[in-house]
Image (cartoon, coloured by chain):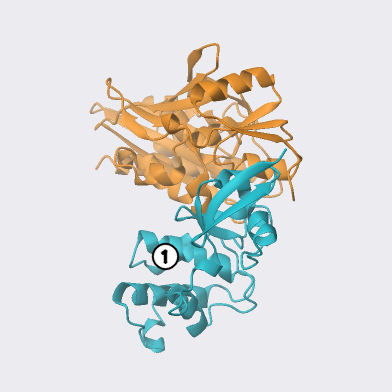
Chain colours: A orange, B cyan
Amino acid sequence: MIPAAFDYVRATSLDDALKRLATAGGGAKAIAGGQSLLPLMKLRLARPETLVDIGRLAELKGVHRLPDGRVAVGALTTYDEMLRDPILRHYGLLADAIPNIGDVQVRNRGTIGGSIAHADPASDMPAILLALDAEVVARSSRAERVIPITSFFEGAFASVLHDDELITEVRLPGGRDDVGSAYRAIEQPASGYSIAGVAAVVGAHDGTGWRYCAVGVTGVGDHPYRAAAVEKAVIGGESLAQAAAHATDGVTVASDIHADREYRTHVASVQVLRALEAAIARLG
Amino acid sequence: MVAHVSLTVNGKPREVDVEPRRLLVQLLREDLDLTGTHVGCDTSQCGACTVHVDGKAVKSCTMLAVQADGTTVTTIEGMATAEGLHPLQAAFWEHHGLQCGFCTPGMIMAAADLLARTTEPTDAEIRHAIEGNFCRCTGYQNIVTAIRAAAVVMRTGVAAPSGAVQGGM
């Protein structure tokens, strides 16, 4: 399978890339690792007129701590680099999830920015970023804006990102000692995509109950979402099992040949419970 | 549109003019006649097209040739030296880590990425490392044995007797 013909330019700087995207008027796509975009282009589900290669922009790579304690992950940071990063090693849910994203060849090329820009409804990284209350920094030649991840995804393969915008950075909250986090997923065995993937961050126990709970779910709805009903139940003092039963409240649960609606609804609750328990277990 | 790609393949500098849509695997197989890298699924799943780009395993059916400009690529043809087969190649032979052999180049390149990261992998780590590589003949048992045996050779410089690396399953 060969992609349809396109023009190719390698951006020399972020500003150069943004200028090219702006002048292309929607006919251009940015390519980084290409692990999501190239398969779509080979199937001719995507036919960009121009590919703007941002893969070598050093300014978009790497992980560093911001002055306020938060952690900035450059959009071009690969899964493999995230896995080896000494700062990110402390996030339990990342350590759980990343080794099982794709395979080693995909993790060597695939980037965090590419993953969320692609907005696959079954991708793991969005659920993780939702549970972490991450922020997405997007830039165009017009402006830079900071988008809370909770308002980033709009539907299957759809986000609020504009055609002329690039994700430059993903910001994570700094680690805190009073919460634990975990990621649990049931995968479709052939593709490895999550039938239900759940990221949980739980903690701040005040002696009577959990005061903090954030749960991100992927693979279940038409886009990854925060399971607000689960969070409310956990903070409201319900048992974890009772809370997990709310995993798909208000969500139209996907149904396909791998998992029908009833089964997917069930395993979503099971994975929520497992993720909550594992997050709490990390608190020691 | 024609793009110029300049890269090092198996130690040799190569210059190729390509259409931007040309895949790295096409450049290797069709422009450079390095047909040891196979095309299996062509959809980024089977791993038969695995090569190393700047030392890391990638699926060359899911990378554009233009993205490899300026990189160093190693294919299965670059693994053996004048002294003989690479320890992974020798171990796949010794332990019969193949039947039809179609997946073998990709398996070996994926395994080489693993052994560059860890010199003493567990069986679980070996199986995890070849998750992106499909074998439709042998059922993986001998492939895992071969990679385990190659790790011993690369670590100690000595090949363990064939029986010594069996078992552990």
Chain designation of label 1: B
Which residue was labeled with disc 1?
B124
Of residue A28 and residue B107, the one placed in the foreground of this image is: A28
Of residue A215 and residue B22, the one placed in the foreground of this image is: B22
Residue lying at 54% horizontally and 72% vertically, measured from the top left: B140
Badge 1, how many Cα within 10 Å: few under 14, some, many 20+?
Answer: few
Residue lying at 57% horizontally and 30% vertically, measured from the top left: A117
Vertical comparison of A87 with B78: above or below: above
Q: Amino acid at mark 1?
A: Ala
**Quarter-wise, where is residue A180 in the image?**
top left
Vertical comparison of A109 with A202: above or below: below
Report the label total: 1
Of residue A47 and residue A146, the one placed in the foreground of this image is: A47
B4 lies left or right of B160: right
Judge whether residue A245 can be spotted in this image. Answer: no
Residue B115 in picture, x, y percent from top left: 39, 64
Residue lying at 38% horizontally and 61% vertically, measured from the top left: B116
Q: Quadrant of the C terminus of chain A?
A: top left
Judge whether residue B152 can be spotted in this image. Answer: yes
Q: Secondary structure at mark 1?
A: helix
Taking the view exactly as shown, the residue that stands out farthest to the top is A142
Residue B7 in picture, x, y percent from top left: 54, 51
Residue B80 in picture, x, y percent from top left: 48, 73
Residue B16 in picture, x, y percent from top left: 64, 51
Vertical comparison of A133 with A125: above or below: above
